[in-house]
Image (cartoon, coloured by chain):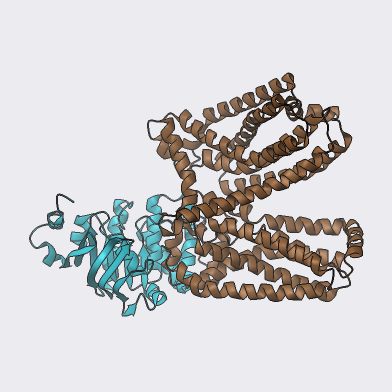
Chain colours: A brown, B cyan
Amino acid sequence: MIKALFRKQFAELISQFNRRGGAKGKRRSTSSVATFLLLFALVFVSLGVSFFVFFKQILGAFDESNYEIYYMIVGLIATAIGLMGSVFNAYSTIYEAKDNEMLLSMPIPPSRILFVRVTALSAMTLLYESAVLLPAFIAFCMGARVSVAGLVTAFFLVIPLTLLVVALTVGIAFVVAAIARRVKNKRAITLVASVLLVVLFYVLYFRAQNAAMALVELGTVPSAIRYGLFFFYQMGTASTGSAFGMGVVLLTGILAYALAYFLLSKYFLRFVTQRRTVSAKGKVGVVKVGGRRQALFKRDWRLYSSSPNYIMNTSFGVIFSVVIGVVAIVQSKALLDARAMLTEALPHLSGTGFAAVIAIFTCVMNDITAPSISMEGKRLWVIRSLPVPAAEVFCAKIALHLVVSLPGTLFETIAISVIFGAADVVGAILAVVAVVAFTLFTACFGLCMNVRRPVLDWRDETMAVKTGFSVFISIFGIMMLSFVLMGLYFVAALVFPDWVYLAVLIVAIFFADYGMLHWLRTKGVARFDKLG
Amino acid sequence: MLEIWNLTKSYGDKKAVDDLSFTVNAGELCAFIGHNGAGKTTTLKCVVGILGFEGGSIRVDGVSVVDDPIEVKRRVAYVPDNPDLYDFMTGMQYLNFIADVFGVSEEDRRARIDKYGEALTLTPEEIGASISTYSHGMKQKLALISAFLHDPKLIILDEPFVGLDPKASHVLKETMREFCREGGAILFSTHILEVAEKLCDKVAIIKGGRLVTYGSMDEVKGDSSLEDVFLDMEDPHD
């Protein structure tokens, strides 16, 4: 029975990658799956390389007397990444899994269903953590004097760390589920909880980076941190051979996991089967007349704004752009000092081009159109059966992307332009135009990719938003492009003033936008009309 | 009103619909019957323009679904067998959306929502509630209201009686008859042969993607029941 449940779980995971949702779950070709996996591996490796560089850099500050600090930092970062990756999954895959009722109606003990789900969650958490742990481990092996026993110990510390992260993940999901049971608007709660978690994560992450560097410089661990982060400090000592540390870490991980599992098994059935009965009684609806295009936009807006998954996974850039804009204003003096340093090396730099490339970089994290066709899912028949040209459907989705993304990125662009390039009015205007053009570019690119490869056969919105070729290519491709554009800017600033770079950029992007819009109007429409 | 000529639709090597031809005229209520996997839903989706097809032609009110699908969709309403609706909307928001797409005036939409809402026992409060709180039957009712909302010429229904309570089923039958009396046409698939027998003017029976029989109800069933006719057509080895 356990084997059957694991097979089902594995099949569910695999089907996300090897089935094309648009053709009634038609299997992808082997080459297509291989390409997808290769791209996935590339992203994983890129992440790993950046962590490797970071860990190699800090390792140099340690020696045999204080390697525990290194592993403490590794443990903290791995925990943060593991939590970030898993916490959104835990709630939806344990409490909100669509096949919960079906499985519970069969002669399967709930404890076994839970066991399989939590094991799958643990495996995913380990995968996220390994993006940090593997490079840290490799950097350590390459840069430090290690013993075999030490290496083996450090390697096995992964297990209690994963147990702890899963316990925390399950605990947070438990709290969210407990609150969601009592409130009418579950989506609002999930959205608020998600935003709070993300904000908390990034605040802690950036503080942790600063704290890590401070620790590196200090060379020892202050007692406040030793006791405040007891588990992670002991993990550090365990990795250098401390039996006490190993005992503490193992015991903590096992106890935390056991407690989380106990809570889960006690309340799982209740949460899943005794849902708050929400009666289908609302206020009397109002008849409101609007135009067709307005109706299409409102439809996409309502879909977006009602889905925490959709918002959180496609609109990080909005938060970042506003934060960067505010930081630019608040820390303007520091930025002007940095600008003074930059203009020594790049005499033509006025800063407006810099404002544009920074805003372009935050655009990467806004990929609202990339899953927009996938989000139609099994409801696609509605729009396909209506007298609505596909081109208008596309327009509404692009409009949503622009409406959500532009305010933040424009604020950021103008803030940095004013501070960095106050005298360059022409440059500032061109920076704004460039950012608008690029935002349109990201909207069109994501939509083109999703029209080509939609994932329609999903049971959980997370699949539509997070998985699929289009989302992957959209984020990865635009990220690479933004790096290239940033690199080109700094090269161009050696020779040309910013306005030249911006003018060329605008022309190039508008050409690309025109090309993609043309594709959408012709081949895109033809593809959309075949979906069903 | 609806003319299907030599319709052929394949999924890979499998012919789901093979050289299918029949018509439904204005004022007619036609039942579309067949075993599971016979090709009924495929045919209906081809008529509505959701699925493309390789051979034949489909015309609604003289307009080809291939040449002008938008114009065809303006004249047609479709309700699938398991209507997944926009659960991020309330019932009223959904109806307003449909009405906006078809350009239904405020007066007309108010009158039709009230009329069909009352007939199908979906109260104003229920229509005002989020679709995510609806049962299957309520979604079915809302989808039916949305179908009648824009006064189409042809209504395509895939298993419309599934999930409806007896009163709503009765009301739907009455509404379908009234719609056809006023000049509209309805093509619907069903497994409930007694309903088809009592309600419909015409019946088309499909098997393995091919039309087995088609004509007026009296012509097709003769002195026996529709159920007997249908079962006689089923090969015991299928």
Instruction: Look at the picture and state if B64 lies above or below B79.
Output: below
Residue A82 falls in image quadrant: top right
Quarter of the N terminus of chain B within the rendering: bottom left
In the current view of this chain or complex, which residue is farthest to the left?
B223
The residue sitting at 51% across, 40% down in the picture is A276
Quadrant assignment, res A164: top right
Residue B87 shows in the view: no
Quarter-wise, where is residue A474 in the image? bottom right
In screen coordinates, is A314 left or right of A248? left
Question: Is residue A425 shown to the viewer in this render?
Answer: yes
Q: Residue at x 49, y 39 (%)?
A: A275
Decide which of A206, B196 is in the foreground and name it.
Answer: A206
Say above or below: A26 vs A259: below
Which residue is drawn at the image coordinates 77% and 41% (left, top)? Answer: A56
Q: How many marks?
A: 0
Front residue of A213/B17: it is: A213
Left or right of A385? Residue A327 is: right
Name the foreground residue: A467 vs A240.
Answer: A240
- Residue A426 locus on image (x, y percent): 82, 76
Q: Residue at x 46, y 30 (%)?
A: A112
Name the side, left or right, on which A74 lies relative to B160: right
- Image location of residue A507, percent across then percent down: 70, 76
* Residue A165 image position (x, y, % from top left): 64, 34
Q: In the picture shown, does residue B113 fall above or below A18?
A: below
Question: Quick check: A382 left or right of A257?
Answer: left
Query: Quick one: B192 or A237, which is closer to the camera?
Result: A237
Location of residue A459 in the rendering, given as x and y in whole percent from the top left corner = 47, 49
